[in-house]
Amino acid sequence: MLLYSIMTLIFYDFETSSRYLVGQILTYAFVVTDEHLNPIQSFSGRIKLNRMQCPEVDAVLTNKLDIMHLQQTGKSEYETAHEIFSFLQNCISTYGICTLVGFNSNTFDLSFLRTLLIRYGINPYFMGKLKNKDILHWAQSLAFSYPEEFPWVLTEKNDKAYYSFRLEDLTQSLGLLNEAQSHDALEDVQLTIKLVYFLEQRFQQKLVDFIAFDISACLPSQEKHPIMGFKSRHFAEKSETPKKFIHRYYYCLSREKNMLLAVDLERLALLSSEEFSDENLLKTIRYLNPNKHFFIAESSDISFDSKLSSLPSMIDENSFYRSLAEQPSSYFTLIKKDWDIDYQIHELGFERIDQLRSYVDRFMAHKNSYPSLLRELLTKRKHEKDTYLIQLFNRVYLNYHPDPDPALSARYLIPRYQTGSMYKGDPQENFFQQQFDYLNSCLENHELETDLPILQSLHQYYSEFQQQFLKKIF
């Protein structure tokens, strides 16, 4: 029998070894509450670094973790993945449909959670019974709806002023936090619950009622491709005065149950007709997922802006845009990148998640079975998704076999720590040597005395990591 038939919330937060999904979760915390924010139960823990993981210096300075102590006290990522899955599954069995709630979680924590589970062949979607809400989206919605009452925090970075929605800035401005944010996973969860309670009381709106994706204002439109206006944060240039929000405009190409595909009209207006290549036009496309993105549309008239008002007819006549409107799923083919599987772990596909789990569990039970299991997988390989499965299986082998093949280790370590080809964007700051040099610089010039033991512990980990793996390869 279900204990709660109304909304059960699971507030959560992770501290990680990296900003990027190639890293891993180091500490985690979940606090279950009812819709009135009364705590019901909690679950938290620490995860030691996998063998192939070397954490970013800034990540460790942020979460203040003693890495060598973590290696002694934390559980393995494999074990933790199963424990977190069991915890969430038990919540659903006990309370019914549950909602994960975090701060900036749809962009960060949710992706790390799904990556953690899929790495070991665990389906992270819970048959649609685990929903998600992002407090950052809700806070922005309240700010845009009540600009005079919202506690705006004006800040500056790189000589540019803007209104901040960082958890630390918001909670300090409201008197909920009187010092720097700890970045302890459990303390951050407790802080987000305080923030939600405060905002609910001030604005008399419940988080559980918040809908982050709403295009209903545009649906009555008789136009096949309505123009959707929406409020957005303003990131001022150096010469600009920051605004609390601005209006932006999208031209809807396709709207389906699980996606909205639109053209960013301001982005398109920046292109000259000579720049209308498919590559440039693709950069004007915006994909919005109702389960992940914040988008509250308003029916809009853009006749006031001559630059924008001429664009819809051009879009209708353009073959690239017409093709996308007719086949919106082709967008995913166009944007597909040769990124590491951890960045796009969903590419494994639902049908292969259980298969991966079977191989991972068989390997973990008998580590010497790796050669025969790999041969079996190679024999069955017929599709690119099978290659992804093998790649993920090999990473489990590298992290958990007592004596992994050095050649296979090098195939992971070199693109991760030497060439940086495993990373999206500019990888140089993630090269091992650059990080090690930065670590040494921090040791010499640390601002806080409390950071010294943390940096010393991290230095020991880096030295051992270099000695064990990298000196044999680089």
Image (tube, rainbow, N blue to C red):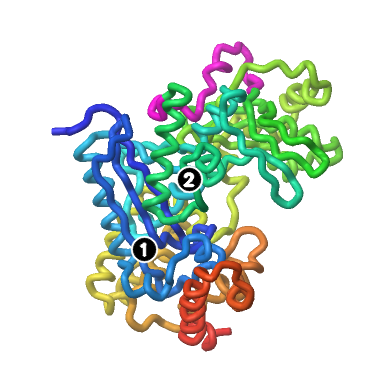
| Dot placed on the residue nearer the N-terminal end, 2 or 1 | 2
Magenta-tinted stretch: 206-228
The image quadrant that residue 97 belongs to is top left
For mark 1, does the 10 Å Cα neighbourhood hold few (<14), some (14 to 19), or many (20 or more) residues? few
**Residue 340 x %, y %:** 53, 61
**Whether residue 356 can be seen here:** no
Which quarter of the image is occupied by the C terminus? bottom right
Q: Which residue has dot 1 on it?
A: 380
- Which residue is pictured at 40% across the width and 33% down the height? 197
Picture layout, residue 77 above or below residue 291:
below
Q: Nearer the viewer, residue 219 or 53?
A: 53
User: The residue under label 1 is which amino acid type?
Assistant: Lys
Q: Is residue 168 left or right of residue 240?
A: left
**In-front residue for pair 268/198:** 198
Q: Is residue 35 above or below residue 282?
A: above
Residue 103: x and y in percent read 47, 43
Q: Is residue 172 visible?
A: yes
252 left or right of 354 in image: right
> In 3D space, how far apart are the residues under numbered discs 2 and 1 (Cα atoms)?
55 Å
Q: Observer-nearest residue: 299 or 317? A: 299
> Which structural element holds mark 1?
helix
Q: The residue under label 2 is which amino acid type?
A: Leu
Please provide percent x and percent y for residue 342. 48, 59
- Tell me, yes or no, whether the two marked residues, 2 and 1, touch with CB atoms within 8 Å: no
At 47% from the left and 25% from the top, the residue drawn is 202
Disc 2 crowd, CA 10 A, few/some/many (<14, 14-19, 20+): some
Residue 209 magenta: yes
Residue 22 as seen in the image, left or right of residue 90:
right
Label disc, if present, on residue 422 of the rendered structure: none
Q: Which residue is mark 2?
A: 177
